[in-house]
Amino acid sequence: MYTEPRGPHANTGPGREARELIQRCVHCGFCLEACPTYRVLGDERDGPRGRIYLIKQMVEGGSTDAARQHLDRCLTCRACEPACPSGVQYGRLLEIGREMVEDDRPAGERLTRRLLLRILTSPRVFAVLLGIGRAVRPVLPGGLAATIPPGAHATAWPTARHARRMAVLDGCVQAAIAPGINAAAARVLDRLGISLVRVPDAACCGALAHHLGDKARALDAAQRTLNACTVALDAGCEAVVSTATGCGVMVKDYGQLLRSSPALAAKAHRVATATRDISEAIDAVSLARLCPGTIASPRIAFQSPCTLQHGQRLAGRVESLLEAVGYRLAPVEDAEQCCGSAGGHSILKPALARELRARKLAALLDREPAAIATANVGCLAHLGATSPVPVRHWIELVDAALATDQRHAESRPIG
Ligand code: SF4
Ligand code: SF4
């Protein structure tokens, strides 16, 4: 796709980068059927090819309301990237496009986004509001009540006793919604001879701000997380682990995000290359040795978050770990499609998010699994709001399998 350099972005760095990325698109349309928003809405401008065209128009003449609306509907799921034979880096192009539309965003929308960012990236504020929501949940209408995740308790964290240590990110909302996830990861790694320690002062990785096109806040959060992770690595941790795939993909991208900062580029590269999704910190053979999985265990369905399979390109890894401890996995149709959570998307575009969730749940529940496993707290809360079966992080299911006496494996607790 040829782009004529004109307008306010013609000679800017992002404008030039966008032109290079757009050039690779040959209009073939192979990406369309991979795109969840195109499938639901059927509008070319709500698919990757149309959005690339809208970004091209912005590079040539500035942003428009239409461009902003169609880019806002994009889930950043990146399912279009593996479908593209020309290797168009759609995710990077979208980042540039989103920054271009921000300046012309109406004040009301900007305020809503700032408020959302403030609540979701401040663990204390979020925990207080969630506590209030849980307290009034019984008197709320069913639809609204379902959006408030039920109460959950923190579980025991093993004492750090191994020479091998890894550091784990707490995240923003995960500690309030599902405080047992990181503790479960710590117990599983402890059995494998690795102590998991928290990264203090690394509240928000910047993923949500990045997703919402707020570059300044994303960079600020990234810098704080970068400093905290550097301290952990300097103290002897061999890796930084994330149990939320949305955070993991962001931290792994720090090298790219901060590449032009002379002061931070080397540090960002170090932290990015030391970052692992929790599934990369565990190998299936060692896990199987702890739990041979020879007794029939419940059938579950795994929802592979977009940030795991498309963002981090780790499709199939979690599935092999779940099978290593004996779970039987139900096949899931359209497994590459987004569940609709997508950062703040489920709040900012609720109707679209509900439709995507209904489609995803229908696919996940098709073979009547006893539970749904996922790898990202946003997906967990979004699917859990209407799922008739429990939705858990996969590491909690692995932890439960390891903790259950093999003689009673059939009754593993997964609820
Ligand atoms: S990132 Fe996802 S929603 Fe956005 S264009 Fe690509 S496939 Fe469609
Ligand atoms: S598949 Fe790739 S080259 Fe083809 S239209 Fe989509 S982005 Fe462009």
Image (cartoon, grey):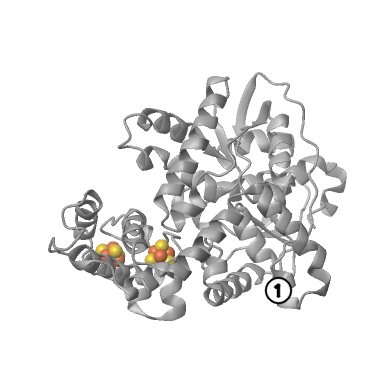
Q: From the top left corner, tell me how far across and down residue 194 is, in percent.
A: 66, 27
Splitting the image into 4 quarters, where does residue 70 fall?
bottom left
Label 1 secondary element = helix
Q: Is residue 217 left or right of residue 59?
A: right
Callout 1 crowding tier (Cα within 10 Å): few <14, some 14–19, many ≥20: few
Splitting the image into 4 quarters, where does residue 370 fall?
bottom right
Q: Is residue 103 above or below residue 196?
A: below
Q: Is residue 141 left or right of residue 125?
A: right
**Circle 1 sits on which residue?**
144
Q: Residue at x 16, y 57 (%)?
A: 10
Ligand 1, image quadrant it occupies: bottom left
Q: Is residue 85 left or right of residue 357?
A: left
Q: Is residue 333 visible?
A: no
Q: From the top left corner, tell me how far across and down residue 304 is, in percent.
A: 56, 56
Disc 1 residue type (three-letter): Leu
Q: Residue at x 42, y 54 (%)?
A: 214
Image quarter hosting the N terminus: bottom left
Residue in front for this viewpoint, 82 or 264? 264
Q: From the top left corner, tell me how far across and down residue 147 is, in percent.
A: 69, 68
Q: Is residue 233 above or below residue 250?
A: above
Q: From the top left corner, tell me how far across and down residue 357 is, in percent.
A: 59, 71
Splitting the image into 4 quarters, where does residue 160 fall?
top right
Residue in front for this viewpoint, 156 or 164? 156
Q: Residue furthest front?
A: 107
Q: Residue at x 45, y 35 (%)?
A: 272
Q: Residue furthest bottom?
A: 42
Q: Is residue 152 visible?
A: yes
Q: Is residue 42 above or below residue 86?
A: below
Q: Is residue 369 above or below residue 267?
A: below
Image quarter hosting the C terminus: bottom right
